[in-house]
Amino acid sequence: MSDKPILFISDLHLEPDRPDISQAFFDFLEAKASNAQALYILGDFFNVWLGDDVHTELSDQVARHLHALSAQGVTIKLMRGNRDFLMGGGYAQTCGAELIEEPYLLTAFNKKVLLMHGDVLCTKDTDYMAFRKMVRNPDWQKDFLARSVEERIAYAAEARKQSQAMSSNKADDIMDVTPEAVTDIIQAYAIDTLIHGHTHRPKVHELANGRDTRMVLGDWDKVAWYISWDQQQLALHYLNPHSSV
């Protein structure tokens, strides 16, 4: 196995209105990911995804950069998040990447870690969990993708508006992961390290049992967060996206 590091990122929320984040990502690919053996993107890569049949200048540009990275021999894995849950294998293939489902068990450097986007762990947010169950239903997705692009855009905008209004009235702990859900998933997969994003609360948590670790990736709004894994350690890092990496 290669001794090059494995990198993890999530919650970039790429969108045309934030070219600074897109450029930070492209710089990251060149400066960091090009020297890695693999890059795992753990959801909410794009701020919204209306279907693989909807191409934008940004999605095409991102695909070109990722495909170039893949051509250098770097393995790329894409996981869906709550913003881009409609991303399919077609776009992943265009990127030279593989779409993976959560939770994803990864073995490397004689150790196992569990990868998730993380929204499914926020079980106290019952409104969101009900919405998640609806939009992850294959029949709902088939119906949604059969709509015109204009209809999809309108639906996504209204859903986002409602989500923001509801979130503003929710207690802080409801928006975070539920400790019991974390414990359950760690025990179910018999691992001691969980990596996820979603909450935008980057931190390395040592769990109460003194043995297990939860590593949380941050979003890329103000700084660019990533986790590196090599023979020595798993570590959380950040970079200023508005300056050279």
Image (cartoon, rainbow, N blue to C red):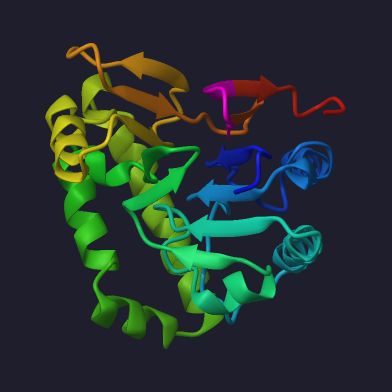
Q: Nearer the viewer, residue 100 or 117?
A: 100
Does 213 appear in magenta?
no
Q: How many marks?
A: 0
Query: Horizontally, is 243 left or right of 80 in the view?
Result: right
- The residue at the far bottom in this view is 146
- Image point (61%, 66%), residue name: 97
Q: Nearer the viewer, residue 51 or 89?
A: 89
Position of residue 205 relative to residue 175, above or below, is above
- Image point (81%, 59%), residue name: 72
Position of residue 221 relative to residue 172, above or below, is below
Query: Horizontally, is 31 left or right of 173 in the view?
Result: right
Picture coordinates of residue 152, whole percent (x, y): 47, 73
The magenta-colored residue range is 228-236
Query: Horizontally, is 158 left or right of 212 in the view?
Result: right
Which image quadrant is residue 191 in? top left
Picture coordinates of residue 186, whole percent (x, y): 21, 36
Position of residue 111 relative to residue 146, above or below, is above
| Location of the C terminus (image quadrant) | top right
- Image point (60%, 42%), residue name: 12
Which image quadrant is residue 215 in? top left
Task: Tell me if residue 171 can be seen.
Answer: no
Position of residue 72 relative to residue 177, above or below, is below
Picture coordinates of residue 47, whole percent (x, y): 55, 51
Does 233 appear in magenta?
yes
Task: Tell me if residue 172 can be seen.
Answer: yes
- Image point (49%, 31%), residue name: 217
